[in-house]
Image (spheres, helix red, strand yellow):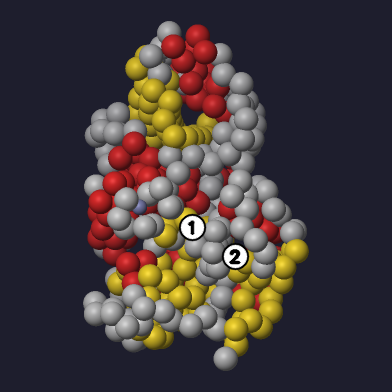
């Protein structure tokens, strides 16, 4: 049996093609995907720029949601027809990190759609632990748009940066999927939120999501001055940075003494020049993040299920229009997630 999938056979091009439908192995489930969320990582893998580039061909797609089509032997807690959302991280389950619940640091960590076939497809087989029963209140599109941004924002703000109620957080790159999730989450957690965007058109949307102030970094590339003016000259407690590049130095300048900078993502550049004095003299904690721990999804799902957190969806495209969807993904006008609908 075959299925339709968005596959990369040569770098730079994702094409829709008929490929063999994956078989379900022991301890796995086969998921009939109904929606796939797009991420910048998809484009990086497509173009051959991924640091751990997998061999071609590869089916792209890190995020997905759908229904269980088949259950492999040894799987007891899931059944055919059940709605599920996919956990994108593949882990060994037995190393020290996995055993201690910090599976984001698994020494065998891999991602769907980056190291192995992903969710731009009608079917995908995954280990049973990666198929998470989904709340009925969320559509497949909403589910596929939620998991990575919210678990990443949660991992960055709550677990890594230890954001507390009453603190002030600056979200740099607030128009991206993870940035818009961070604005909402920080607001729900009781923080004062300052967001940066390069487009005035996004200002009202960011305020609607929970930003208390918005700074346009195109008008003020040295945005730390504007942020300091908004904080009585003191600076913010935490910066959530999903942009990288030159925004890292400005993020350090925007922090109060002893502030925390949490970074993940580098679409503005994977290299940054830093004035070490600004880091040392102000006792800044510069923290990195990569993946969320699977247990963090358990903390988040109730907030998504009851509507406290509402995924921001920029646009949806049919699987056949995957190339256009990826063009939209990298458009500066995009606000929130781009999702593929898979009939
Ligand atoms: Zn492990």
In percent of the image, x 34 and y 36: which residue is there?
160
Do labels 2 and 1 touch, CB within 8 Å? no
Query: In which quadrant of the rendered view does residue 82 lie?
Result: bottom left
The image quarter containing residue 139 is bottom left
Tally of numbered tags: 2
Instruction: Work out whether residue 116 or residue 118 is closer to the camera in this orientation and state it.
Output: 116
Quadrant location, the C terminus: bottom right
Q: Please give the name of the residue rendered at 64% of the width and 35% of the height, measured from the top-left corner.
A: 269
Q: In x, y percent, where is residue 28?
A: 37, 76
- Label 2, label 1: how many angstroms apart (C-alpha)? 11 Å
Q: Residue at x 63, y 66 (%)?
A: 58
Q: Residue 37 carries which label?
A: none
- Residue reaching furthest front? 95
Q: Please tell me which residue lies in front, 175 or 36.
A: 36
First in sequence: mark 2 or mark 1? 2
Pointer 1: what residue?
111
Place residue 88 in its image quadrant. Answer: bottom left
Callout 2: few (<14), some (14-19), or many (20+) C-alpha neighbours within 10 Å?
many
Identify the secondary structure beneath mark 1: strand
**Closer to the camera: disc 2 or disc 1?**
1
Q: Which residue lies furthest to the bottom in this view?
A: 1
Quick check: 230 above or below 118? above
What percent of the width, then of the height, locates residue 300? 29, 55
Image quadrant where one finds the N terminus: bottom right
Query: Element type at marker 2?
Result: loop
User: Whole-percent x and y of residue 301?
Assistant: 29, 60
Numbered badge on residue 60:
2
State left or right for residue 162 relative to residue 10.
Answer: left
Q: Is residue 204 above or below residue 232?
A: below
The image position of residue 5, as x and y in percent, is 62, 76
Residue for point 57% across, 19% down:
274
């Amino acid at each position: 049996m075959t299925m339709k999938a968005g596959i990369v056979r040569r770098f730079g091009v994702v094409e829709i093609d008929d490929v063999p439908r994956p078989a379900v192995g022991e301890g796995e489930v086969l998921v009939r995907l109904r929606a796939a969320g797009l991420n910048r990582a998809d484009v990086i893998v497509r173009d051959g720029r991924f640091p751990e580039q997998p061999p071609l061909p590869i089916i792209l797609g890190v995020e997905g949601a759908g229904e269980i089509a088949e259950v492999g032997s040894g799987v007891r807690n899931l059944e055919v027809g059940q709605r599920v959302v996919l956990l994108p991280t593949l882990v060994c389950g037995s190393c020290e990190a996995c055993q201690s619940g910090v599976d984001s640091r698994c020494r065998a960590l891999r991602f769907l759609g980056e190291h192995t076939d992903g969710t731009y497809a009608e079917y995908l087989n995954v280990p049973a632990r990666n198929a998470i029963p989904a709340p009925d209140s969320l559509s497949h599109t909403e589910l596929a748009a939620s998991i990575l941004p919210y678990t990443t924002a949660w991992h960055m703000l709550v677990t890594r940066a230890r954001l507390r109620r009453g603190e002030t957080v600056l979200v740099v790159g607030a128009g991206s999927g993870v940035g818009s999730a961070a604005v909402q989450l920080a607001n729900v957690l009781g923080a004062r939120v300052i967001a940066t965007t390069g487009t005035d058109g996004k200002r009202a949307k960011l305020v609607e999501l929970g930003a208390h102030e918005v700074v346009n970094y195109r008008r003020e590339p040295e945005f730390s001055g504007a942020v300091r003016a908004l904080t009585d000259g003191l600076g913010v407690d935490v910066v959530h940075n999903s942009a990288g590049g030159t925004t890292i130095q400005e993020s350090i300048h925007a922090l109060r003494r002893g502030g925390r900078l949490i970074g993940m993502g580098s679409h503005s550049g994977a290299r940054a020049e830093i004035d070490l004095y600004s880091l040392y003299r102000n006792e800044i904690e510069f923290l990195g993040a990569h993946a969320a721990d699977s247990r963090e999804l358990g903390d988040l799902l109730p907030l998504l299920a009851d509507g406290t957190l509402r995924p921001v969806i920029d646009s949806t495209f049919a699987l056949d229009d995957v190339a256009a969807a990826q063009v939209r993904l990298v458009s500066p006008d995009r606000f929130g997630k781009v999702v593929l609908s898979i009939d």
